[in-house]
Amino acid sequence: MFIVDYVKDVYGAMKSLLVGMNRTGYYFTHHKEIITEEYPDNRETLILPERFRGEVVMAHDENNEHACTGCSACELACPNGTIKIINKFDISPEGKKKKAIDTFVYHLELCTMCGLCVEACPTAAINMANTFEHSVFNRGQLTKRLNKPDSKLKAGVE
Amino acid sequence: MFSLETLTKLVQDWLNKTFPPTWALLIEFVIVGILAIALFAALGLVLVIMERKVAAWIQIRLGPNRVGPLGLLQSTADTIKLIMKEGLTPDGADKFLFNLAPFIVMIVSMLILAPIGFAKGFHIWDINIGVLYVSAISSVSVIGILIAGWASNNKYSLLGAMRSGAQMVSYELSVGLSVLSIIVLTGSLNINDIVLSQQNGWWLFKAHIPAIISFVIFIIAITAETNRAPFDLSEAESELTAGFHTEYSGMKFALFFLSEYINIFIVCAIGATLFLGGWMPFHIGNWESFNHIMDYIPSFFWFFGKTFFMIFLIMWFRWTFPRLRVDQLLNLEWKYLLPISMVNLIVMTLVAIKGWHF
């Protein structure tokens, strides 16, 4: 019947509109759960998600040791040449040459924060940090060295 | 008790004593004009900040909160910015019509203000065909919009203006029919009489379901007639940039913007007058003591309270519903609202003749 469908249409439309208004009315009357981050003001209390990708950092422990073997898997994984690894050769006590990292160069200005380097790393030496305030006055300051001076490879990491 | 009626009487008596009658009348004209412009400016500022705050609260945001206490001076700052901007007229535009259009829209909004009763005994012009006057004048604003769209010499503007024309012409019908259903009950087009007929309760409650149906139709149709979301096809910013006022800037844009909000205020005031009793306090039948307590709240506050309630409803619509397509918009009017309001009008006439209302 046409008229039955018509009335059903009108009824369904009114009902769905009221459901929508009920939802927004709930938000309007519950003005406590605000999603706005008042960023520069709440800098101290700002909580970022754990998986937020701000920049690549290399973790060092208290003995100034890191886990980077200098395999350059991250350099190969990077789609836009952000990472450059410069290796050196340590002489072990037995007189053997051993490959080790000299400088881990990280070009923040080229980085798109895709996180592929972190996934490629076989020893979990690098990870993504939460920091995001990267503005500087000079582009040169964005080229960073990730391994700290005089740091060395953690024992047992191959 | 303080009332605006005594105030206006005082002013009129003083003017008539001090000046000859012609001059007194002229001075009254000037005072009314200044008051109307002041009301417009105040309403523009208040409604813009209200809209932004309502939008923010519905979307769980904070809204403007930097300029002034709680961000309440934001719209003032915006207005100052708009005044200082250059009012550019495009090279290919029809210069005369382009500059005329915002004033037509604005003057129409000003004209509709005349018969509205703001408080007990406080209106600009107590005309005996008030509602007819409002519905007649309000359809002129579509001409302003069409001129703006045509004179801009811009495809977006023209498309927006044509859509707006189609929309306003069709929705005028259901506004008219739902207004008529209340006129049938009151038997008068005078706004003062309509308000006085709601002495023992508002029409929304007195006339049962037909009044509620016509209230719903009225509020849908005025949302469409003032070109607001979900019916904002004429300025659909995702498709048409800004519709008919794409080419306008500075104060000329501000006039369009202002007249949009003034129109909302006016249609809401008409709705409040017809369905919610205008400045009439909330009365229930013969409960004398209750009615008496309600009378202590000045009629001015009742009028503005009801009007702002209606405005809030319309803002609530805007931030809840998605925009309609053009064909959906016209389907809604011609297939649903118009037949329903026609049937509703017949039912309402029956109610009025049989005296089934309270």
Image (cartoon, helix red, strand yellow):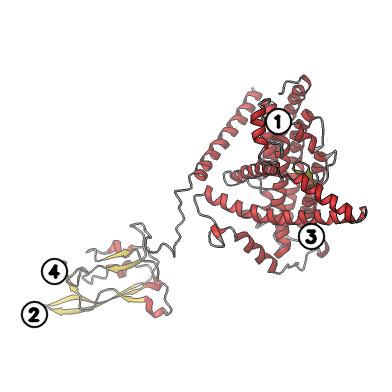
The three-letter amino acid code for the residue at tag 2 is Gly
Q: Mark 3 vs mark 1: same chain?
A: yes
Which element type, helix, strand or loop, lies under badge 1? helix
Q: Which mark is residue A155?
A: 4
Q: Residue at x 65, y 29 (%)?
A: B289
Query: Disc 4 sits on a residue from what chain?
Result: A
Instruction: Write down the residue under mark 3.
Output: B151
The three-letter amino acid code for the residue at tag 3 is Ala
The residue closer to the viewer here, B342 or B285, is B285
Query: Disc 1 sits on a residue from what chain?
Result: B
Task: Give how far apart the Cα atoms at labels 3 and 1 are.
Answer: 43 Å
* Residue at the outermost left position: A94
Percent of width and height locating residue B203: 71, 30
Q: Residue at x 71, y 39 (%)?
A: B279
Q: Residues within 10 Å of mark 1 (few under 14, many from 20)?
A: many
Percent of width and height locating residue A58: 27, 69
The three-letter amino acid code for the residue at tag 1 is Trp
Task: Give how far apart the Cα atoms at labels 4 and 1 are.
Answer: 86 Å
Query: Disc 3 sits on a residue from what chain?
Result: B
Instruction: Write down the residue under mark 1.
Output: B203
Q: Residue at x 69, y 30 (%)?
A: B201
